[in-house]
Amino acid sequence: DRPLVIKVASVAAARMQVYFIDNEDYFHRKQVYCDESGNFFQDNGERAIFFARGVLETVKKLRWAPDIIHCQGWISYILPAYLKKVYIDDPIFSSSKVVLSIYNDINGISCPGDLKDKIAYGGLEKDGIRLSDSPTGEELAEFAAGYSDGIILGSADIPAGVQDFCKESGLPVLPYNEESYNDGLYINDYNSFYDQL
């Protein structure tokens, strides 16, 4: 158990509020995911768990009922499983759909061996967590995809095995389109993708 700090900022031009999940032990560092030598922080798995639960508990506390929860980046990859297994009976999330964006940030990730034990919570039991003892970024992406409602491939260099897993999942998949990203039209692609869910 660690204290969760919620910070709020406003983007006046867009008339939007932005909420930040914070914790001094997990997020007050000079580097984001790796130390100065390029080694993945050993507590990154715990940070991802804290982030996932923090986001879901914040949404509950604020009494929002999200239509779409869009998970971007490996640090959000535990959230889909928590939403579908732990928070499944919560009325706030009864109509929520999870969209997972996968990027090339999964390359080179290796989590510590106790991550599987730490992820287990509520209705998400250790026996049902399909991860190895030291999961890679590719495994985490596939784990998250298994609990998502739609998948967006956001980079050209996502490992082929992950791309194949997503395409074979039977879920709607929005493939990477470099031209769409370069000209900014990917926003329209995302909106159409959301609408089909």
Image: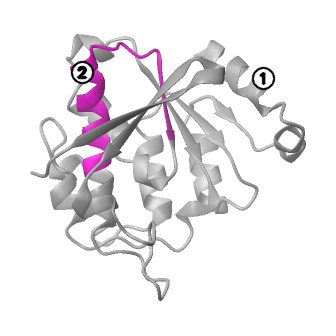
Task: For marks 1 and 2, give the CA distance.
Answer: 29 Å
The front one of 176 and 139 is 176
Q: Which residue is mark 1?
A: 188
Say which of marks 1 and 2 sits in front.
2
Taking 145 as reference, is 57 left or right?
Answer: left
Q: Residue at coordinates 16% horizontally, 52% vertically from top-left?
A: 126
Q: Residue at x 9, y 51 (%)?
A: 1
- In the figure, 197 relative to 73: above or below? above
Corner quadrant of residue 122 = top left
The residue wearing badge 2 is 60
Q: Position of residue 68 (x, y in %)?
A: 49, 21
Q: Residue reaching furthest bottom?
A: 37
Q: Secondary structure at mark 1?
A: helix
Magenta span: 50-71
Disc sitting over residue 61 in the figure: none
Given residues 52 and 86, the one toward you in this image is 52
Residue 54 on the magenta span: yes
Q: Secondary structure at mark 2?
A: helix
* Image coords of residue 3 (percent x, y): 15, 48
Q: Is residue 189 above or below residue 129?
A: above
**Which three-letter amino acid code belongs to the residue tagged 1?**
Asn
Please name the residue shown 42% across and 53% down the image.
75
Q: Look at label 2 and name its amino acid.
A: Lys
* Picture mark count: 2
